[in-house]
């Protein structure tokens, strides 16, 4: 759409005065002596008749523009001063540059430039044909105006990312928005693994002991470190005081019995003599062995 730029709309005023000699309103014939009146088209009109019969209609609010109101006009259209605002941002334009568009809308210079497809979205100046420019989502910028929202440097041929309406170079976007790896605290730019609601680089999510990658493998954690099953059994897991094998929590018999620094698989916590399970029951310990009370009496 084409637009015409103007320095401002003109204020339209009428001659108003008070009569000292006999004089009548052109419409109601009331004596205007000592009263305020309006002269329009060489006719003397009382303010009441002016508001009712002669006042122009505001192009914005569609109400009459009374004799006491400030009126602006442009191309046979009229506005109250307070109604003469940008159709986009509602900025008052009575004393500001504006553009009158083909669809009748009045816009401030900034919003009018944004509506024009050939104007730079950074500086709002015209992008000349053949000049270096950047087009993105049906908008255009001068190459030097297409800058990172954070560091303000021109993007030029770099890759960029967006957040809302803001544009960021890849380093600034990574620094400001990328998740940080729970292990190395560095940004995760692609992929990654989530464990216990914490993000990890795939290459950081490895066994603490053997450094084997754990993505897609069975593993367990201990004191904020992760281990593959084999290393956990060998280096971390407690040994059952009964069978001497590691207590891993994997597979059969995940419950554990602890007593005075020793641990047992629940299925190993049995009377040495009669093999009765003593989990959650009274027992007697003698050396490295446990007994039910009845067997302990017979020893």
Image (cartoon, helix red, strand yellow):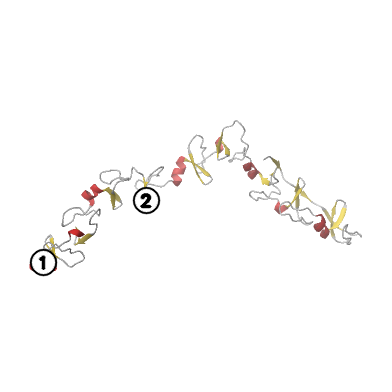
**Depth check, front residue: 16 or 80:** 80
Q: Quadrant of residue 261?
A: bottom left
Residue 134 against residue 263 in the figure, above or below: above
The x and y percentages for residue 124 are 61, 40
Q: Which numbered disc covers residue 214?
A: none
- Quarter the N terminus occupies: top right
Q: Is residue 262 visible?
A: no
**Depth check, front residue: 280 or 194:** 280
The x and y percentages for residue 209 are 25, 46
Write the residue at 37% across / 51% down.
Answer: 198
Residue 275 against residue 114 in the figure, above or below: below
Question: Horizontally, is 272 left or right of 153 in the view?
Answer: left
Q: CA distance from mark 2 to mark 1?
A: 51 Å
The x and y percentages for residue 132 are 57, 32
- Quarter the C terminus occupies: bottom left
Do tag 2 and tag 1 residues touch (Cβ < 8 Å)? no
Question: Horizontally, is 8 left or right of 38 in the view?
Answer: left
- Disc 2 element: strand
Q: Quick one: label 2, few (<14), some, or many (20+) residues within 10 Å? A: few
Q: Quick one: label 1, few (<14), some, or many (20+) residues within 10 Å? A: some
Question: Horizontally, is 109 left or right of 37 in the view?
Answer: left
Disc 2 or 1, which lies upstream in sequence?
2
Residue placed under numbered mark 1 in the picture? 295
- Disc 1 element: helix
Q: Farthest residue toward the top?
A: 130
Mark 2 or 1, closer to the camera: 1
The x and y percentages for residue 51 are 80, 58
Residue placed under numbered mark 2 in the picture? 198
Write the residue at 9% across / 69% down.
Answer: 297
Q: Quadrant of residue 201?
A: top left
Write the residue at 88% across / 51% down.
Answer: 42
**Depth check, front residue: 237 or 280:** 280
């Amino acid at each position: 759409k084409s637009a015409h730029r103007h320095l401002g709309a003109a204020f339209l005023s009428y001659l108003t005065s008070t009569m000292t000699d006999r004089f009548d309103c052109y419409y109601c014939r009331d004596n205007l002596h000592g009263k305020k009146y309006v002269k329009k088209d060489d006719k003397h009109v009382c303010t009441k008749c002016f508001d009712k019969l002669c006042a122009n209609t505001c192009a914005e609010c569609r109400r009459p523009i009374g004799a006491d109101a400030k009126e602006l006009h442009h191309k046979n259209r009229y506005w109250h001063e307070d109604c003469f605002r940008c159709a986009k941002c509602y900025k008052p334009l009575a004393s500001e540059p504006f553009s009158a568009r083909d669809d009748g809308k009045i816009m401030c210079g900034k919003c009018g430039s944004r509506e024009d497809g050939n104007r730079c979205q950074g500086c709002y100046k015209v992008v000349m044909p053949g000049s270096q420019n950047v087009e993105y989502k049906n908008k255009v910028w001068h190459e030097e105006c297409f800058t990172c929202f954070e560091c303000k440097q021109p993007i030029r041929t770099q890759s960029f990312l967006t957040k809302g309406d803001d544009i960021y170079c890849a380093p600034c976007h990574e620094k400001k928005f990328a998740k940080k790896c729970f292990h190395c605290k560095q940004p995760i730019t692609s992929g990654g693994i989530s464990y216990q609601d914490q993000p990890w680089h795939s290459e950081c999510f490895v066994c603490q002991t053997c450094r084997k990658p754990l993505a897609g493998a069975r593993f367990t954690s201990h004191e904020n470190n992760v281990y593959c099953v084999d290393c956990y059994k060998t280096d971390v897991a407690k040994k059952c005081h009964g069978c001497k094998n590691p207590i891993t929590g994997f597979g059969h018999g995940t419950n554990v019995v602890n007593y005075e620094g020793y641990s047992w698989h629940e299925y190993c916590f049995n009377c040495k003599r009669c093999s009765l399970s003593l989990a959650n029951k009274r027992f007697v310990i003698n050396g490295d062995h446990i007994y039910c009370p009845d067997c302990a009496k017979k020893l």
